[in-house]
Image (spheres, rainbow, N blue to C red):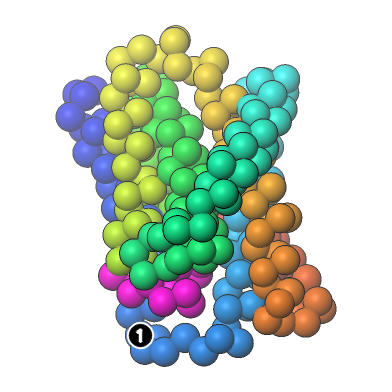
């Protein structure tokens, strides 16, 4: 296998994340009442992805996965505390709480992409057929992750094309990490469960403390619970099929 093939494959997985923003090119206006449903749907997708990540990490190593999850929660708490003190925080047209939430979601997905990049590189270390299979699975899996990011950004006034770009940017660590992971499989493979756990812990914490509480402001508790549950189950089934 060539390093360039591995890099190209990982880059394709990153670009696939931007497909999640495509539906929003056909939605010209996003009423405020959609914000609750969008947050609940994003929460469900992220929760389902987190459960799958933990399950995958445990298959490698239980302790490293749990330690990674705990570290993920602690770092997100620390980052939110540090950024929360900056009232002038702005991301594009977003300011204040909206900017903080958008920054945290994109940041978490970016960290999550490091683990996926290692997964691509390690899989190609096992042969081209395995690498192609894992790459295809991650690329498809990245589409709903891009949708989750767009569901947070677009209802808050971010244009669809920019949400798609942010989605792709969040996945750029995949081609960056795939190359060294491919070249040094034995070194990177032990780090994979910790990375998966880290991403899962961070996402679950954000779902519980940010997305669900925000969703409840604009939708009923029953609606939020139903949408979150359905989205989480759909994501778990989707990833299980892959």
The image quarter containing residue 44 is: bottom right
Q: Can residue 137 be seen at all in this image of the molecule?
A: no
Q: Position of residue 220 (x, y in %)?
A: 78, 82
Residue 159 in magenta stretch: yes
Number of labels in the image equals 1
Residue 80 in magenta stretch: no
Query: Which residue is at a point 73% across and 55% down the rendered structure image?
Result: 208
Q: Position of residue 93 (x, y in %)?
A: 36, 70
Judge from the rendering whether residue 126 lies leftward or rightward of residue 66; answer left or right.
left
Most distant residue in the right direction: 222
Label 1: few (<14), some or many (≥20) within 10 Å?
few
| Circle 1 residue | 26
Query: Which residue is at a point 33% across and 74% down the rendered structure image?
Result: 159
Judge from the rendering whether residue 1 lies leftward or rightward of residue 155; answer left or right.
left
Query: Which residue is at a point 36% across and 89% down the rendered structure image?
Result: 28
Q: Can residue 151 be seen at all in this image of the molecule?
A: yes
Viewer-proximal residue among 33 and 235: 33
Image height of 28 relative to 39, above or below: below
**In terms of secondary structure, what is the magenta stretch mainly?**
helix
Q: Position of residue 61 (x, y in %)?
A: 67, 20
Judge from the rendering whether residue 147 lies leftward or rightward of residue 28; answer left or right.
right
The image quarter containing residue 2 is: top left
Viewer-proximal residue among 55 and 63: 63
Image height of 109 relative to 72, above or below: below
* Chain part drawn in magenta: 146-161
Query: Which residue is at a point 60% across and 55% down the rendered structure image?
Result: 46
The image quarter containing residue 43 is: bottom right
């Amino acid at each position: 296998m060539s390093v360039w093939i591995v890099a190209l494959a990982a880059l394709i997985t990153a670009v696939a994340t931007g497909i999640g923003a495509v539906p929003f090119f056909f939605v010209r206006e996003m009423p405020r009442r959609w914000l609750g449903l969008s947050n609940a749907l994003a929460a469900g997708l992220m929760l389902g992805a987190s459960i799958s990540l933990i399950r995958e990490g445990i298959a490698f190593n239980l302790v490293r996965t749990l330690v990674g999850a705990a570290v993920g929660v602690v770092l997100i708490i620390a980052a939110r505390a540090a950024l929360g003190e900056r009232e002038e925080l702005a991301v594009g047209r977003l300011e204040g709480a909206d900017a903080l939430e958008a920054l945290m979601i994109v940041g978490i997905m970016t960290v999550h992409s490091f683990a996926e990049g290692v997964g691509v590189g390690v899989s190609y270390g096992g042969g081209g057929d395995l690498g192609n299979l894992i790459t295809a699975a991650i690329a498809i899996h990245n589409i709903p992750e891009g949708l989750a990011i767009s569901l947070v950004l677009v209802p808050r006034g971010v244009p669809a094309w920019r949400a798609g770009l942010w989605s792709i940017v969040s996945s750029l660590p995949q081609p960056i990490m795939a190359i060294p992971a491919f070249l040094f499989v034995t070194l990177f493979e032990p780090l994979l469960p910790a990375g998966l756990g880290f991403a899962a812990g961070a996402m679950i914490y954000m779902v519980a403390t940010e997305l669900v509480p925000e969703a409840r402001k604009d939708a009923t508790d029953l609606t939020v619970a139903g949408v979150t549950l359905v989205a989480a189950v759909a994501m778990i089934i989707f990833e299980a099929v892959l």
